[in-house]
Amino acid sequence: MPPESRADDASRFRAPIGTYDILPPESERWIAVTETFAHRASRAGFDFVMTPMFEHREVFDRVGASTEIVRKEIYEFEDKGGRKIALRPDGTAPVVRSFVQHRPPIPWNVWYLAPHFRYERPQKGRYRQFWQLGVESLGVDDPEVDVEVVALAHGFYRDLGLSRFTLVLNSMGDAGTRERYVDVLRGYYAKHGDALGAEFEERVAQNPLRLFDAKRDDWLEVIENAPQITEYLSDDAQEHFERVQEGLHALGIRYELDPRLVRGLDYYTRTTFEFQSQSIDSAQNAIGGGGRYDLLAEEMGGPPTPGIGFAVGIDRVLLSCDAEGVLRDVVPRADVFVVNGLGEQAARQVTLLVMELRENGLRTERAYGDRSVKSQWKLADRSGAAYGVMLGRAEAERDAVAVKDLRSGEQVEVPHEALLAWLQQRQEAGGTDT
Ligand code: AMP
């Protein structure tokens, strides 16, 4: 094969740009994060839901025709049946679609773990396939639900050991508020932004809300002095917003108000929030966010049903864990390593013992083939197992095995029939920590 085509193969067999493999032991941290989330969500009465990885393209229309996510980043294609299909760029729309389709009793509280797809410019903390954990609560518009949902996200970060993050809070008002506010902004920018150039004008025409994320110094002053959405809230929306703030205060959850937090999705009404890490790069510092979407179910053809949810990006959560030095050492270690001291012909005997220990809850490893006892003990040490169990000739004569505490090096003989109980007793006492 000519060298060029070998090089081509090498790049063809790499994960596509913006995607990644999650290998052990890193994958263990993903399990730990997911389990932490699952426990918290379950205690709050949320059940697991799974929706397809792709949907009809229209499901995402309400995420926002003018948003980057839908305008530029969506992965869409026509399937062999000529249907317009999109890979999920957002977690809320598919769950609400599922709610509208099945009409489960309300309140419907669900959580999910799912890959999401956006054609973004890849960088640290920003990928084309990324994983989100999220919750959605449909059916209740009580501000206490908002408080509980925000507290759930907050509690999840705290469970992981994170402390250097800020909760930022805003309200997008009711039906019509966003549209009225967009008009107000356009009017303001038409008066104050005319010297800022064609790109500025284009962005005002497209979606003036997105200018709040603009990083241009020459635009800063005009943007900072723009009217704020919170000046346009109805009395109801204002009262709702205040009750959410009082609730968070009562729970001792600190937050900052930011009337410019308008988020990248069009379906939000009333409460919106974002958790920002202070320990990672500011361009990718959003470790989670969400809000209320009281109109979305109806817009998807369902009965009028209020809803609220949030999603957290696992990648960024792990980056913050690294930066804060938490969630380390989650690598599971073997409980037991079985060493064959009887030669290759005893391999089946080792299999039987290994299976018995595994069936009884012990993470058990072994070696294969014709390895010397010495090299097996080396593997036992490397496995991190708490105990090594050796089938040895002298012990076999007494129907016993040799058990070595791999940390202290201390060795004892244990009758074969007492081995399982002996190991389990130590595991319960914390001798074999996994
Ligand atoms: P969003 O739906 O944009 O509010 O995203 C929710 C969360 O998902 C964010 O707070 C991030 O933690 C994470 N996230 C969003 N986009 C990406 C991406 N391209 N790569 C990795 N994580 C992301």
Image (cartoon, grey):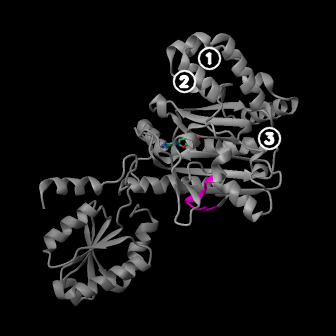
Residue 295 drawn above or below residue 381: above
Q: Within 8 Å of ligand 1, the CB of disc 2? A: no
Q: CA distance from mark 3 to mark 1?
A: 30 Å
Q: Amino acid at mark 3?
A: Pro
Q: Secondary structure at mark 3?
A: helix
**Residue ID for mark 1:** 223
> Which of the image's four quarters has the C terminus?
bottom left
Residue stretch in magenta: 49-57
Tell me residue 172's x, y (percent): 73, 32
Residue at horizontal 69 percent and vertical 21 percent from the top = 186
Q: Amino acid at mark 1?
A: Ile
The quarter of the displayed image where residue 200 is located: top right
Q: Are marks 3 and 1 in contact (CB under 8 Å)?
A: no
Residue at horizontal 56 percent and vertical 41 percent from the top = 69
Q: Secondary structure at mark 1?
A: helix
Could you tell whether 211 is left or right of 215 in the image? right
